[in-house]
Amino acid sequence: MSDLLALAAELVAIPSLSRKEAPLADLVERRLGACAWLDVERLGDNVVARTSLGRRRRVVVAGHLDTVPPAGNESARFEGDVLWGLGATDMKGALAVMVDLAEQLAEPALDVTWCFYACEEISREDNGLRLLYAERPDLLECDVAILGEPTDAQVEAGCQGTLRVAVRLGGVRAHTARPFTGRNAIHRLAPVLARVAAWEGREVVLDGCTFAEQLQAVAVDGGVAGNVVPDAASVTLNYRFAPDRTAEAAEAFVRALLGELLDPDLGDAIEVLDVAPGAPPGLEHPLLAALVADTGLPARAKVGWTDVASFAEHGVPAANYGPGDPLLAHHPDEHVDRASLEAVRAVLARLLTASA
């Protein structure tokens, strides 16, 4: 086994902002290309390495190469057995585990596809998994998938869906000295915001995992000039919905929640900006059940959206499992410790070598 903390630090030291993952993809391709038991293919900055041992089952272990922009945490640094730096948590710690296992497991009991992909942290249209599914779906064929997203070495099953909408309200322009001659579109946002703030949420339990829905206003826009009653205003909402709802059902819920507050005569409308469905837990699959059992911890719901949903769209049960505290993802104090790296490696090694 490699020194996982040192390997993670080597990966952190290679900048890999979204769309700039090439140097990190080069390293992965070079190292895994030296393994005679792996067939390595590269599509753009997506690197896929596969065993072809004729095993009865195949698992994809996937992780994204990119990071969010730095926040004064570009450099890797150590404090004892803790590595600090951009991507340490999300998710170069997991990438280090993947590289090490791919280099060490020449004859796993399962066929394994190691998938290192680009552009997870930006728009879904750019996502490397989407590119692979569009151009080389054969590379992702499998029975189950495990995403190395940070979960603190506890399986996080499925994921929430995400819907972003713009609620656009109209009005009538007027002089601010005579507002009664117009209709203030910004003021009309008040009941919409109040309705959103008052919504108490919804909880859904699937496979023993509790998915807690959230609805938040994330942006407000409006205004013409300092002396003009505005005739247009909008608020952008983000709805994180449980995977028992489809994208269509999520949109219908938001429209029903706010519908009575909209006035078609003023041109009010709700526009869907983007949507990504969630993924059910899928823990009934024996490989994912074995993964949960080996951790010794109950599975919990994945709060945010991850690419388990991309696999679920293609009928593949998937779960999140990786080192690092998920609350530190995208945080300037990102860090991962040796114990978490080694715990995840041990569990994945047992799954890949003891299952059939």
Image: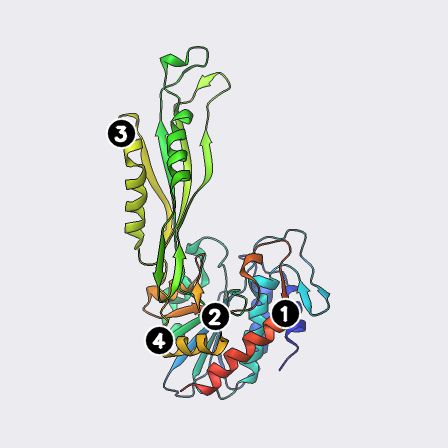
Of residues 149 and 100, which is closer to you in this image?
149
The quarter of the displayed image where residue 304 is located: bottom left
Expressed as whole percent of the image width and height from the top left, the position of residue 186 reads: 42, 26
- Cα distance, mark 4 to mark 1? 31 Å
Tell whether 309 sits left or right of 116: left
Q: Are marks 1 and 3 in contact (CB under 8 Å)?
A: no
- Residue 62 tag number: 2
Expressed as whole percent of the image width and height from the top left, the position of residue 90 reads: 56, 62
Q: Residue furthest top?
A: 178
Tag 1: residue type?
A: Ala
Task: Provide the secondary structure element on which disc 4 rests.
Answer: loop
Q: Which residue is mark 1?
A: 8
Can residue 234 be seen from the camera position used here?
yes
- Residue 264 tag number: 3
Which residue is rendered at x = 62% and y = 65% of the image? 336
Tag 3: residue type?
A: Pro
- Cα distance, mark 4 to mark 2? 18 Å
Expressed as whole percent of the image width and height from the top left, the position of residue 334 reads: 62, 59
Q: Which residue is mark 4?
A: 285
Tag 4: residue type?
A: His
4 or 2: tag closer to the N-terminus: 2
